[in-house]
Amino acid sequence: MTKQQHADAVHPHEPKVKAKKPLSTNLLFLIIAATAVFGFVAGTRSEQILSVVGPVFGVKVYAGDIDLSSVQATYKALKANYDGTLNDKTLAEGANKGLVAAAGDAYTLYMDSKETNSFENDLSGNIGGGIGAEVGLRQSKITIIRTLKSNPAEAAGLNAGDTVLSVNDQATTGWTVEQAVAQIRGEAGTTVKLSVQRGTEVKEFTITRAIISNPSVESSVTNGVGTLTITRFDSETGTLARAAARDFKSQGVKAVILDLRGNGGGYLTAAQDVAGLWLDNQVVVSERTNGKVVDELKSGSDAILAGIHTVVLVNAGSASASEIVAGALQDHGAAKLVGEKTFGKGSVQKLITLPEGAQLKVTVARWYTPNGKNITKEGITPNITATLAQKDVDAGIDPQLDAAKKELGL
């Protein structure tokens, strides 16, 4: 029996309800008129109504307006006098960007459709066409830092440490990392030619670009120590990190190194999931407004790695969600931090879809560690300070990793 049928059915033992008298014509007219008026008000004042009832359902709506007559005046003057071609859509996007930028918050941004697409690809690890290699500068030379598993660079035989001499016969001397990446990336299915130096030998590679998906989590076990490297916090991070943790447990690791260096953050829920690998139903981070706690985010109750000696590697590039995880593990005594003071971004942004594929990335909260430390103002100070200078990178050594191993008694 369907719900509608059940609702319409009359229980055989219930008394029948007497039929109601029909409504009078005047009363019926008044009801119709009132309904029409309410419908008109709801249609013309929907934002005002939502601003009142919205919070009940967790929806924030602002009912006010801003006087944009000056913008219209500027637009008309520009159109009337500009010697050139103007694109109205581009002008509108510029106005939106300026409006949001005037909030004065570096993390509150208006993104047009192209920027939105790029942002979503960066966060998901889908970087488009490429070869699947991370490049950096070593001794001022473009160098392959690592190759990603099951991607063209690895298949072609590129190795970490290879110095890139040229890309498509263009010498890389004086190039920045960004310039190198821009030349190496391209449409999937096309090829890129790389000349690299490996020791004293020069090798040539012609590699077919492919769509590259770069997982946010990598893990390995060496000599009983599990290393968990998280490069960002995306929608898959929690699942991937938990799978790695289970693998650590199955291999009986005696210690864990969580590497969050250079991780600029991502989804708050992913940070909650990762912290939950060590914390059992404990506060991960708190939200405060005007100094008062208005919400607390707790971990789950399946702390696979709880009690395992853990060190977290952080540096100035560890921000936002990375700081939330590092701060929570430090405050609860679940891990010691090794490296450099973190970036100091304790605000969380919400993504709001706007017309024509645009998005508003807006700061909606300020976060504090379980012990009440304001991440934005202070960052997270490691228990053990260790630096990684360019000369160390050039020499292929990692003093921060060495300090972590020393802390673990290795």
Image: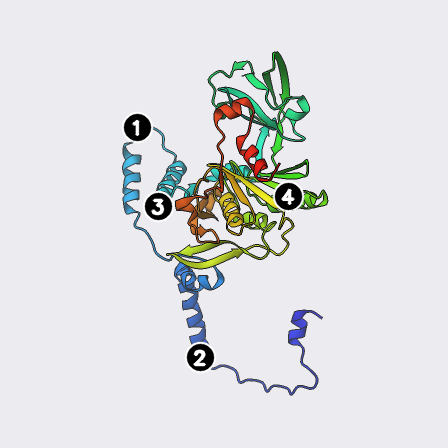
Mark 2: amino acid: Leu
Tell me the distance, in whole angstroms, between the alpha carbons under discs 4 and 3.
37 Å
Q: Nearer the viewer, mark 2 or mark 3?
A: 3
Residue annotated with mark 3: 103
Residue annotated with mark 1: 83
Q: Nearer the viewer, mark 1 or mark 4?
A: 4
Residue 32 can be seen, yes or no: yes
Mark 4: amino acid: Leu
Residue annotated with mark 4: 240
Residue 167 can be seen, yes or no: no
Mark 1: amino acid: Asp
Query: In x, y percent, where is residue 406?
Result: 57, 36
Query: In x, y percent, where is residue 313?
Result: 54, 38
Tell me the distance, in whole angstroms, between the alpha carbons under discs 2 and 1.
65 Å
Tell me the distance, in whole angstroms, between the alpha carbons under discs 1 and 3.
32 Å
* Location of residue 10 by image quarter: bottom right
Tell me the number on the disc at residue 27: 2
Q: Are marks 4 and 3 in contact (CB under 8 Å)?
A: no
